[in-house]
Image (spheres, rainbow, N blue to C red):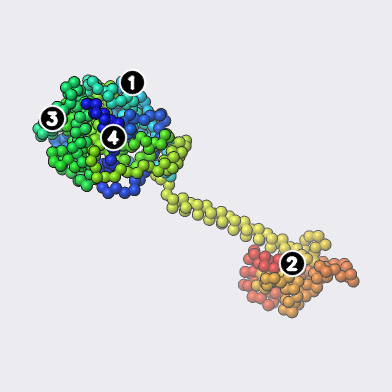
Amino acid sequence: MEQDPNGKEKPRQKPPEPEDKGEQGQPKPVALVLFHDDFTPTDGFYYFRQKTMSMFNGARLVPDTTGLADRDVPSRFPAAGPEAQPGGVGIVPEPTDSSLTRTVRTTVNLIIAHPLPIGLINPTRMEASGNPDPYHFVRAYKVESAAFIGDLSTLMGRRAGNPLWSRQVWSHYTRTPEDPRYRRLATEIVGRLQEQYREDPLAQAVMVKLWLETEGTYSLSQRILDSDDAVARFLFGDKVGYCVHFAHAATHLVRSLGIPARVATGYAADARYRFEGSALLLQDANSHAWCEIYLEGVGWVPLDVSPQRTDARPPPPPDADLQRMLGQLARKEAPSQEGRPQAKRDLNALARKALAVLARGAGILLVLGILAAGVGKVVRRLGPYVGPESTRTLRTFRAALDCLADVGVLRPFGDTRERFARDQGNRFEALAPLTEFRMREALGDPRNPSPPEARELLEHYRNLARQIRRSTPFWRRLLGLLNPFSWLFVR
């Protein structure tokens, strides 16, 4: 529970607050943050800042262009290799009291591309990291932050601002619209504080926050801040808006009290949804804007307005299984550092690569199959001429059938070689004696146990070749000779 400066407890309610208005749909993952140090914020929310708006240009708050302010906010992603700078991106951290802050190390793995880096506030160092899984993450980088570890009440009595700031920087962070209503309303709000707290910067800021939470209504139906008087119309009108309206209104009000403040945007995630693990999945529904005030020794402290009245439903928690799975992927050791975005691997491209590998493998197998079949054919054709005498009859018979297969005379399915040869004996007379010799050898002939002479077998084999040449066109015989698989149909 949160307490106001008067000691009253107030329930903490966090509505969904996207940076820009829009319809709420199914939340989509945007980043996976891996914690290397156990840290749970006392207010129950992790704030991951992406950019700030601190310069009042006479009409509205915009990002600083002077180079004097917001030097603790990185303006680009950290680079790797020779382009890397000490500290990663040249962050100039604000001085902090070591008794109030501690270093928290995280690795941010972006799931979708971002124009600027995000980091747990307040970052002191940011450097490139190798992408552990380019298929799921577009970029990864390491962040060290000086995180506030105390209770908000411990900051009571702290002075606002940095005593080392120049007058120009002080003016930058406290400049407000010339509209006197801001100062008048802020004075009225802090006038409700108990007397001992009325001069305390933190008490004043918290009172502004509590007033906005009580008087305002959170609604996604309002327009974005697209005009110079949008904040005034919200604050001095119906006070119906969303996080951007409340953050700007709070910043103008506390600035009118002399407290340095700025608007920050990024992501605010409920600490409960870390599920006691080391990974936290950020979703687009966590997109948020909030006010930050500067307190000496701590730096920038979120002053987040959470209206009691809201017409928006809170976003569902991240999928615990998905968060766990992405956390495991993020813990893998990356092959190398990459300071620039790494494109996700396209699933279609992976499929095409897989098909290409399969095609190459199939091509190699086909070539090897053709070569093996060709070698088998040559070996069978040489059967009548080389090999042991005991199997010469069988080898010559097989070579004769192969000659028939070359010209399209194939053995029907289920027929034995002998039956097929006997059927073709009427067409090719030289085949009949070869078939007879093979039958005698296979069945045994007690009257003539000796195998036929090699010369006799070769004569019948050559006669068959001549008969085939006379009855078959040359092109057909050439095609058969070049076909390495023809013998498979008669073997």
Q: Nearer the viewer, mark 2 or mark 3?
A: 3
Q: Quadrant of residue 233?
A: top left
Depth-wise, is mark 1 or mark 2 nearer the camera? 1
Instruction: Determine which residue is flagged by label 1.
Output: 98
| 53 lies left or right of 33 | left
Residue 218 percent across, percent down from the top left: 23, 41
In the rendered structure, the answer to whether residue 142 lies left or right of residue 191 reads right
| Alpha-carbon span between mark 1 and mark 4 | 28 Å
Residue 12, disc: 4
**Circle 1: is it few (<14), some (14-19), or many (20+) Cα within 10 Å?**
few
Asked if residue 8 can be seen in this view, the reply is yes
Percent across and percent down for residue 112 are 36, 43
N-terminal-most mark, 2 or 4: 4
Task: Work out whether residue 165 can be spotted.
Answer: no
Identify residue type, mark 2. Answer: Arg
User: Mark 3 = which residue?
Assistant: 188
Evaluate if marks 4 and 3 touch, with contact meaning CB atoms under 8 Å apart. no
Q: Earlier in the sequence, mark 1 or mark 3?
A: 1
Q: CA distance from mark 4 to mark 3?
A: 24 Å
User: Mark 1 vs mark 4: which is more N-terminal?
Assistant: 4
Q: Amino acid at mark 1?
A: Ser
Q: Which residue is mark 2?
A: 398
Residue 337 is situated, as x and y percent measured from the top left of the image, at: 42, 35
